[in-house]
């Protein structure tokens, strides 16, 4: 039996290995990618966009951006250097436009990822709330059952009053038994 099981395992392993290897009697699949396309890992790209969006919202970025613009304008206004971007600063405007064209989608992508995380968090909160409600309802039913059971159980005061009543009856019957019998008038 053990040898048969071992043989089955070996056969299954060989069959699986054959499936993974390309067959020689069949032509290879045609190369579909004649052009090189970059493989984009959406998770990494999303994390990078979140990091950039987070950086765009910092005071450090604003200070660096302001310093860059001031240096750009200063170098293009003074006469010491050659003006590569004269007064209307068209090249600077182009740089800002390009930056905005990339920054806006990155920020939107980061917001979409945050919205997805928020949606998942809300769903998990909803599930936890449903479980908490179910547990609370179960505990309320258990408390109600215990209250009903306690009402059916004799309380200490009830038992004490019943015992006192029995003791009184016993004392009364004892005193009746100890009293001398009245003389009978039958005669």
Image (cartoon, rainbow, N blue to C red):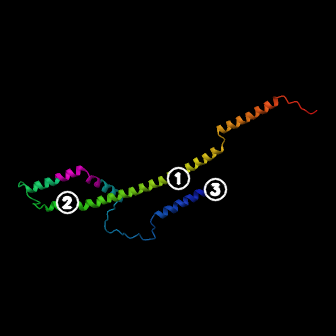
- Location of residue 152 in the rendering, given as x and y in whole percent from the top left corner: 66, 45
- Location of residue 120 in the rendering, given as x and y in whole percent from the top left corner: 42, 56
The Cα atoms of the two marked residues, 2 and 1, are separated by 56 Å
Residue at the disc numbered 3: 1
| Residue sticking out furthest to the left | 79
Pointer 3 or 1: first along the chain: 3
Between tags 2 and 1, which lies in front?
A: 1
Between tags 2 and 3, which lies in front?
A: 2
Pointer 2 or 1: first along the chain: 2
**Quarter of the image that includes the N terminus:** bottom right
What is the number of the mark on residue 96? 2
The residue located at (57%, 50%) in the rendering is: 141
Which one is nearer the viewer's eye here, 85 or 39?
A: 85
Residue at the disc numbered 1: 134
Q: Residues within 10 Å of mark 3 (few under 14, many from 20)?
A: few
Which one is nearer the viewer's eye here, 37 or 106?
A: 106
- Location of residue 137 in the rendering, given as x and y in whole percent from the top left corner: 54, 51
Q: Is 60 on the left-hand or right-hand side of 179?
A: left
The Cα atoms of the two marked residues, 2 and 3, are separated by 77 Å
Q: Quadrant of the rendered structure where residue 173 is?
A: top right
Q: Quadrant of the rendered structure where residue 94 is?
A: bottom left
Query: Where does the magenta region start and end?
Result: 52-67
Q: Is 29 on the left-hand or right-hand side of 149?
A: left
């Amino acid at each position: 039996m053990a040898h048969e099981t071992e043989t089955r395992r070996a056969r299954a392993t060989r069959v699986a290995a054959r499936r993974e290897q390309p067959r020689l009697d069949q032509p290879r699949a045609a190369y579909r990618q004649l052009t090189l396309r970059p493989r984009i890992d959406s998770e990494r790209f999303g994390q990078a966009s979140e990091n950039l969006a987070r950086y765009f919202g910092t005071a450090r970025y604003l200070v660096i951006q302001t310093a860059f613009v001031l240096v750009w304008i200063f170098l293009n206004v003074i006469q010491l250097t050659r003006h590569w971007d004269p007064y209307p600063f068209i090249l600077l405007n182009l740089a800002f436009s390009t930056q905005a064209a990339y920054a806006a989608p990155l920020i939107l992508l980061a917001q979409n990822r945050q919205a997805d995380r928020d949606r998942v968090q809300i769903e998990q909160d909803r599930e936890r709330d449903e479980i908490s409600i179910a547990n609370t309802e179960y505990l309320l039913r258990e408390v109600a059952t215990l209250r009903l059971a306690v009402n059916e159980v004799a309380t200490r005061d009830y038992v004490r009053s019943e015992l006192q009543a029995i003791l009184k009856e016993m004392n009364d019957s004892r005193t009746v038994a100890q009293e001398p019998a009245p003389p009978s008038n039958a005669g």
